[in-house]
Image: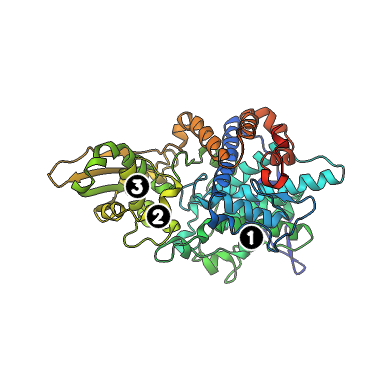
Amino acid sequence: MENMTVTGSPFKTDQVLEDIATYTAAPTPFSETARTTARYVLMDTIGCGILALRFPECTKLLGPIAPGTVVPHGARVPGTPYVLDPVRAAFNIGCMNRWLDYNDTWLAAEWGHPSDNLAAILASADYISRQNRSKGKPALVMRQVLDAMIKAHEIQGVLALGNSLNRHGLDHVLFVKVASAAVSCALFGGNEKEIAAVVSQAWIDSSSLRTYRHAPSTGSRKSWAAGDAAARGVQLALMTLRGEMGYPRALSSPKWGFQDVLYGGKPLRLDRPLGAYVMENVLFKVSYPAEFHGQTALEAAIRLHPDVADHLDEIERIEIITHESAIRIIDKTGPLHNPADRDHCMQYIVAIGLIHGTLNAGHYEDEASRDPRIDRLRGKMDIRESKAYSRDYLDPEKRSIASSVQVFFTDGSETPRVAVEYPLGHKKRRDEAFPLIMDKFRENLRTRFPEKRVNRILQLNSDEQRLLSMPVDEWMELFTSIESRGSYELDS
């Protein structure tokens, strides 16, 4: 790759920047597994965003910066009447998709949600397609969206394998910004050199702090942080394509580069060649909107529900054995102040599972949290690490997220210890999960659209070959808010 130039002098581009740019710019033949998984990620993520439109705390953040602004041939925001510039549209879509903590997950040295990049991809692709149509040019097709998703998943996920931002107090959405900048630049027609430049800009932007994800400061910013990162990636891409320069030593510059300033002087690395590994192995939140490190403990608690539901007042102690990352992120005692606090608390999640035998987004709201049984059970929980669980969590051949739960009663009796090694959304349980993901998608769509529209969307997205060739703007039209059109013409 031709090196970037800074103030007239050539510098060798940092290897990570070069590898990401080369991978993003090149056509890549992806496996059937990767494309099929990407199709389910597409449906699942959009469905999560549609469901989030039921929550006023989410919808108050949506729309244009200046109320009433409509961008000619702009990008649409699914389920809403908004037509926006691609930067603001990316924020809107990302805010919706992430609000309920229900989209896909990647767990490694760093954790995150690779489908957060779909916000940048859809906003860019819809905007490009509609602008092209206005000029008599062809729209992009959904195959390009799925390919961009696979690449964004791979960039974010492979960066996460060996580079832990959280141990430096930095938030994982930096990797969203990097991936979104790269793939949106490519969608807009950027070449390898331009992609390297925009990725360097994303690194120089750096990252938000993790303050809003941890007690005592856990708050709703964690639900829009990824949308913010995706939007910034699109903005940087558009600036770069107007000729803005890049910074080839953004990572490695002595004293002033990312590695020395914010990463303890350690080199950032890519632990494996970029391909489709992350999409093929990504984790789905199939049935329960809970932070993923708590999913197996929740499944165990739900299995124990029939044994304990009528004996909650007789519980003496609840023992949870899990992996180190879960303890570091979601082991919380004391008061929980808001839904963002509760959905990142292992004890709260397990208590809901034991009490109700299920969990949905409403269980994190203030009214549900006032149930005195929840805090009584939380106070009886003991969380411990299993070294074996922690090893298997990091083992690339296993990538388990194991937990076990056992309940002990005041009369000396106890339940069996229920252990769950792989959550429902794990690659090892794909055959079990895919039909349930379709059910989840259907139910989420029903919260916004009439049954005829729901069936049409399901039929199209179930036909992979038809979906791949569909123009992006026509696909987005399926999710145009009924309120914005004033009729059901899409359902006729």
User: Does dot 1 land on a helix, a strand or a loop?
Assistant: helix
The answer to which image quadrant residue 143 occupies is top right
Q: Residue at x 50, y 62 (%)?
A: 170
Residue 459 pos. (x, y %):
63, 28
Q: Position of residue 174 (x, y in %)?
A: 57, 58
Residue 387 visible in the shown view: yes
Residue placed most toward the observer, 263 or 232: 232
Q: Which residue is mark 2?
A: 367
Mark nearer the N terminus (1 vs 3): 1
Taking depth in this image into account, of 112 and 246 the one nearest to the observer is 112
Q: Is residue 173 visible?
A: no
* Residue highlighted by disc 1: 202
Residue 263, how many percent across, how many down?
51, 64
Instruction: Tell me the quadrant of the picture where the C terminus can be found.
Output: top right
Residue 352, disc: 3
Check disc 3 and report its element: helix, strand or loop: helix
User: Can you tell which of label 1 and label 3 is closer to the viewer?
Assistant: 3
| Residue 253: x %, y % from top left | 61, 67
| Amino acid found under the numbered disc labelled 2 | Glu
Residue 467 lies, with reference to residue 373, above or below; the image says above
Q: At numbered mark 2, what does the secondary structure look like: helix, strand or loop?
A: helix
- At label 3, which amino acid type do we have? Ile
In the image, farthest residue toward the bottom? 255
Q: Is residue 44 left or right of residue 375?
A: right
Name the front one of labels 2 and 1: 2
* Structural crowding at the residue carrying mark 1, measured as other residues with C-alpha within 10 Å and reported as few (<14), some (14–19) or many (≥20): many
Q: Residue drawn 34% across and 38% down?
A: 420
Q: Is residue 82 above or below residue 358?
A: below
